[in-house]
């Protein structure tokens, strides 16, 4: 089986930075994904890491350390519309894609 | 319309009935997935498929059946619905290759009474 852990909730102020951590233990590894999900909607893709290091995409960055089984999603210059759940997902060798329970981020004015 | 669509969007059924949730994608993606989402559990994988006629169990397959006779369709059947299967169900698809993200349908909200 596999284990993907992330914090349940985080709160931050508009304009601030928030870092959402994800740790995983899987039998194989073929990439780590971050998704955003607004309440009542489907998840949408944010970022992908398969090699160690930082991937930057505008206000969002994602980091991966394969040796530590660790990733984080960094949200900069927070906006009210960033209030959502953020899901960490790991793809195993056979393309099975499994998700953590998600982190609900609340942005306050 | 291009994309991935689920039907119905909402369904209420009675305990013990059989119900099928439909999923259709127009991209000819190889991989398709079914998840259920419940408060506190996030997205849990029910079944996934690597190609037509190839399916594998995920984390929570009991009480569900899938088939994939055509690449574009991946129906999920609850053989005898139970109240514990009340949930939001998401279908997703992705193509082969590293870095290819999964695209999700809009979800089906199923209530078993």
Image (cartoon, coloured by chain):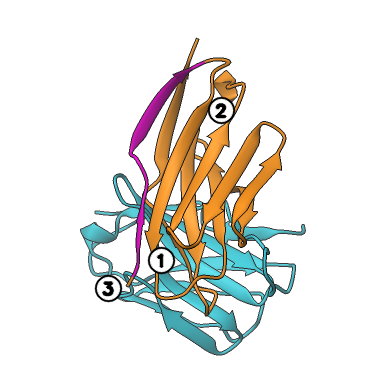
Q: Do labels 3 and 1 share a chain?
A: yes
Q: Residue visible at 44% across and 24% down? A: A106
State the residue in front, A1 or B25.
Answer: A1
| Magenta extent | A2-13
**Would you call the spot at circle 3 few (<14 residues within 10 Å), some (14-19), or many (20 or more)?**
some
Query: Which numbered tag is attached to residue B45?
Result: 1
Q: What secondary structure is marked by label 1?
A: strand
Q: Do labels 1 and 2 share a chain?
A: no
Is residue A31 something one can see in this rendering?
Answer: yes
The image quadrant of residue B61 is bottom left
The image quadrant of residue A56 is top right
- Give the residue pinned by disc 3: B80
Of all chains in the rendering, the one displayed in orange is: A
User: Looking at the picture, how far across and down is residue B78, in whole percent?
Assistant: 35, 71
Q: Residue visible at 58% across and 81% down? A: B50
Is residue A42 something one can see in this rendering?
Answer: no
State how far apart marks 3 and 1 are (Cα). 19 Å
Of all chains in the rendering, the one displayed in cyan is: B
B11 falls in the magenta region: no
Q: Upstream in the sequence, badge 3 or badge 1?
A: 1
User: Looking at the picture, how far across and down is residue B17, in whole percent?
Assistant: 29, 69
User: Looking at the picture, how far across and down is residue B75, in whole percent?
Assistant: 51, 73
- Give the residue pinned by disc 2: A82
Query: Which numbered tag is attached to residue A85?
Result: none
Q: What secondary structure is marked by label 2?
A: helix
State how far apart marks 1 and 2 are (Cα). 26 Å
Q: Which chain carries label 1?
A: B
């Amino acid at each position: 089986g596999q284990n993907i852990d992330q914090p349940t909730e985080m709160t931050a102020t508009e304009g601030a930075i928030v870092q959402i951590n994800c740790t995983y233990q899987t039998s194989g590894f073929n990439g780590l994904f971050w998704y955003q999900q607004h309440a009542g909607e489907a998840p949408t893709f944010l970022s992908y890491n398969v090699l160690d290091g930082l991937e930057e995409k505008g206000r969002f960055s994602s980091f991966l350390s394969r040796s530590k089984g660790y990733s984080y999603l960094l949200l900069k210059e927070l906006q009210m519309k960033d209030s959502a759940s953020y899901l960490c997902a790991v793809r195993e060798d056979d393309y099975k894609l499994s998700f953590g329970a998600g982190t609900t981020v609340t942005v306050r004015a | 319309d291009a994309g991935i669509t689920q039907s119905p969007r909402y369904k209420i059924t009675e305990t013990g009935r059989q119900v099928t949730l439909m999923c259709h994608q127009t991209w000819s993606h190889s991989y398709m997935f079914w998840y259920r989402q419940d408060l506190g559990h996030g997205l849990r994988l029910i079944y996934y498929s690597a190609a037509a006629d190839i399916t594998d169990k995920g984390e929570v397959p009991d009480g569900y059946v899938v088939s994939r006779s055509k690449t574009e369709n991946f129906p999920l059947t609850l053989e005898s619905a139970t109240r514990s299967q009340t949930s939001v169900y998401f279908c997703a698809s992705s193509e082969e290759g590293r870095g290819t993200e999964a695209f999700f349908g809009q979800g089906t909200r199923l209530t078993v009474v």
